[in-house]
Image: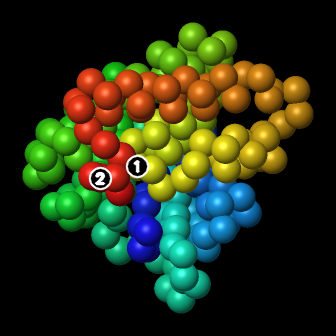
Amino acid sequence: MSRIDIKITGFGGQGVIMAGMIIGKAASIYDEQFATMIQSFGPEARGSACSAQVILDREPIAYPYVKAPKILVTMNQDAFKLFAAHLPEDGILIYEEDIVEPKGVSLPPERMFGVPATRIAEEVGRTIVLNVVMVGFFAAVTGALTLESVEKAVRASIPAGTEAMNLDALSRGYEYGQKVLAERGQAVESIS
């Protein structure tokens, strides 16, 4: 694997920064990779735009800023509109399919992956775990991280007492990603 530049976007309160932290932690602590993360917030605590820029690589990372993400993970329409234009033609779009309508992107359909993360999170018990659903889905469709490393990172990152709910959210997101790939007859290696 070479360097992968990732931008995770959404509103404050959707767990965007936590998703970035889990991905970075999974890579750097549990998957023998290097990782960096830079976060950006709007002035409000909740409801404003925020993003996490995460870089994964097998080699040390000298420059931690993402100029054009290889992978864009977006949890709302405003974030999609703001960042989708920066995706390269060989990029990957991962989006919350009940909230984001991915119009105007010049990616082939096999490089766009929608997941009903909010619905899955509600089935798990709390909408707040939609970010963990997205992380599981990300791991499944990109192959950038092992499920085992992400599970360990989730356990190390979440509040005590929420382990079962968060691990269920992770598992469901990962399973949904595997299902999407299987339905398309698409292998992870073809997109990573």
Residue under numbered circle 2: 191
In the rendered structure, are the residues bearing label 1 and label 2 in contact, judged by CB atoms less than 8 Å apart? yes
Residue type (three-letter) at the residue carrying disc 2: Ile
Taking the image as shown, residue 137 lies to the left or right of residue 123, namely left
Mark 1 closeness class: few <14, some 14–19, many ≥20 residues within 10 Å: many
In the depicted structure, whether residue 127 falls above or below residue 46: above
Which is more N-terminal, label 2 or label 1?
1
| Residue 105 image point, x, y percent | 15, 48
Residue 80 in sight here: no
Q: Secondary structure at mark 2?
A: loop
Question: What is the spatial separation of the Cα atoms under label 1 and label 2, in whole angstroms?
Answer: 6 Å
What residue sits 23% from the left and 30% below the top?
184
| Residue 83 image point, x, y percent | 30, 56
Residue 84 in sight here: yes
Quadrant for the N terminus, please.
Answer: bottom left
Numbered badge on residue 142: 1
